[in-house]
């Protein structure tokens, strides 16, 4: 493809911003904060993404999704770059995306909580149940169905739910 | 020894310990005591293998001979691995795994906290990212140490034995050689003496909370820095490397 301009850059960003997360399809890679940067250099498209977790199995999927989606729109010269700094944090997840997570049945990360850096979670914070909003919930396991989630149980509606951990 | 040679070795030490402990944790897959714990242990495995990938890839980049993370993982022999002796200890029963992981995670927790200030950008970025994961690993194992130590008389006896049996291997974590000295002068590596002090206080705090007795520091096994290992690493590698050894360069 020839002559990529500023308007093509905006167009490409719009395409990228709509790519859904492979594991949580209700939010996009932009909303998740994985999509960091877009550069066009000599008609070569350089997309920078950052890993959520070091062992995140979705990273390869992110890369494939980005290349495939752009290829379908006619952009073939695409290079996906991994960046490690600044380190990804759940603080980058937008409020709209948090609302979408909740509606999807995943309790969004509760900001500014003691999750980070603290050795013991003995003073457990209350995570609202995404179904009934009850704060009467119990942590069952710090490690849930994927690396980014913890398993909680709602003591009011008696349903288990995933909590998106703070990182 | 050049700075780059030291940096390759330093990255391999981190990456190898993550890889070997990650492989050990993956052995729990489908064997966990409960479904939730099975998932927790395989998640920890996944984090560790992720951390290993970053460090092995980095070692290959500095070396500049085109070796990839897979080359390092699958094509090195036992005497070329720089993982801690602790990380290769067999899983044993659940308490043995908890004790081993707690001691190793407490090490990584303080190690990464210090490595964040490394003048090497990649090591600093890796530490910044990994500390978040290791905090969860440490919390998970520390809570189990307390639960088992403060549990029934049987669970207490078992976890105390686990610590007694593994204690000879903790000294190896803090050994240093010229690699550490060279990189410490450059502001790249961490001060192991400081890490040891912090590790000691975390370990004592948790063991005390658990009502367990901290074993005495007697004779310590060492070998990590010279890539000398216990009898267990060879068996672990035989299983982990089987496919690449039997079908070299096989791809998915
Ligand atoms: Zn509920």
Image (tube, rainbow, N blue to C red):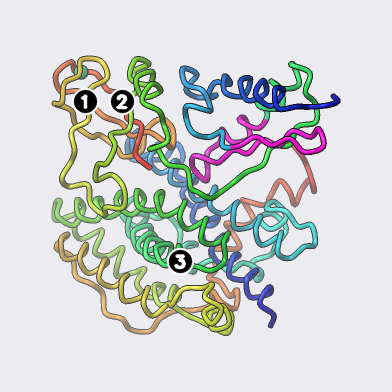
Q: CA distance from mark 2 to mark 3?
A: 33 Å
- Tell me residue A119's x, y (percent): 26, 54
- CB under 8 Å between discs 2 and 1: yes
Image quarter of residue B224: bottom right
What's the magenta region? Answer: A37-63
Give the foreground label among 3 and 1. Answer: 3
Give the camera-side residue of A50 and B246. A50
Q: Is residue B120 above or below residue B66?
A: below
Asked if the stretch drawn in magenta spans residue B85, the answer is no
Asked if the stretch drawn in magenta spans residue A44, the answer is yes
Point 33% across, 59% down: residue: B102
A142 left or right, relative to B69: left
Q: Is residue B231 above or below residue B27?
A: below
Q: Regarding mark 3 in the picture, which secondary structure is present there?
A: loop
Give the camera-side residue of A125 and B106. A125
Give the camera-side residue of B247 and A28. A28
- Tell me residue B63's x, y (percent): 73, 65
Give the foreground label among 2 and 3. Answer: 3
Say few, some or many: other residues with alpha carbon within 10 Å of mark 1 (under 14 / 14 to 19 / 20 or more): many
**Which residue has dot 2 on it?**
A107
Comes first in the chain, label 2 or label 1 = 2
What number is the disc on residue A81?
Answer: none
Q: CA distance from mark 3 to mark 1?
A: 36 Å
What number is the disc on residue A128?
Answer: 1
**Which residue has dot 3 on it?**
B117
């Amino acid at each position: 493809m020839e002559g990529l301009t500023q308007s093509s850059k905006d167009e490409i960003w719009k395409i990228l911003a709509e790519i859904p997360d492979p594991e949580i399809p209700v939010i996009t890679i932009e909303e998740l904060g994985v999509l960091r940067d877009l550069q066009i250099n000599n008609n070569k498209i350089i997309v920078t993404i950052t890993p959520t977790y070091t062992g995140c199995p979705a990273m390869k999927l992110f890369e494939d999704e980005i290349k495939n989606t752009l290829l379908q729109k006619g952009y073939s010269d695409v290079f996906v770059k991994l960046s490690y700094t600044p380190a990804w944090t759940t603080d980058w997840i937008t409020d709209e995306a948090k609302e979408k997570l909740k509606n999807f049945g995943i309790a969004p990360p509760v900001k500014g909580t003691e999750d980070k850096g603290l050795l013991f979670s003995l003073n457990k914070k209350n995570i609202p149940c995404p179904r009934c909003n009850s704060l009467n919930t119990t942590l069952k396991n710090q490690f849930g169905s994927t690396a980014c989630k913890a398993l909680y149980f709602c003591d009011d509606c008696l349903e288990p739910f995933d909590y998106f951990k703070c990182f | 020894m050049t700075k780059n040679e030291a940096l390759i070795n330093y990255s391999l030490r981190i990456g190898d310990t993550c890889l070997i402990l990650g492989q050990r944790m993956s052995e729990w897959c489908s064997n966990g005591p409960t479904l939730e714990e099975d998932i927790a242990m395989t998640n920890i495995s996944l984090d560790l293998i992720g951390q290993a990938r970053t460090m092995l890839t980095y070692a290959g980049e500095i070396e500049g001979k085109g070796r990839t993370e897979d080359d390092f993982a699958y094509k090195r022999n036992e005497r070329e691995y720089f993982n801690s002796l602790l990380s290769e200890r067999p899983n044993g029963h659940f308490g043995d795994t908890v004790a081993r992981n707690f001691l190793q995670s407490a090490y990584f927790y303080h190690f990464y906290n210090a490595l964040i200030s490394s003048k090497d950008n990649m090591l600093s970025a890796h530490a910044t990212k990994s500390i978040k994961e290791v905090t969860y690993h440490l919390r998970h194992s520390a809570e189990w140490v307390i639960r088992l130590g403060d549990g029934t008389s049987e669970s207490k006896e078992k976890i105390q034995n686990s610590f007694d049996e593994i204690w000879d291997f903790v000294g190896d974590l803090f050994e240093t050689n010229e690699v550490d000295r060279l990189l410490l002068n450059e502001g790249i590596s961490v001060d192991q003496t400081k890490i040891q002090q912090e590790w000691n206080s975390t370990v004592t705090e948790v063991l005390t909370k658990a009502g367990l007795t901290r074993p005495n520091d007697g004779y310590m096994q060492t070998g990590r820095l010279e890539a000398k290992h216990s009898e267990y690493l060879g068996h672990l590698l035989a299983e982990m490397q089987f496919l690449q050894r039997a079908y070299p360069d096989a791809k998915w």
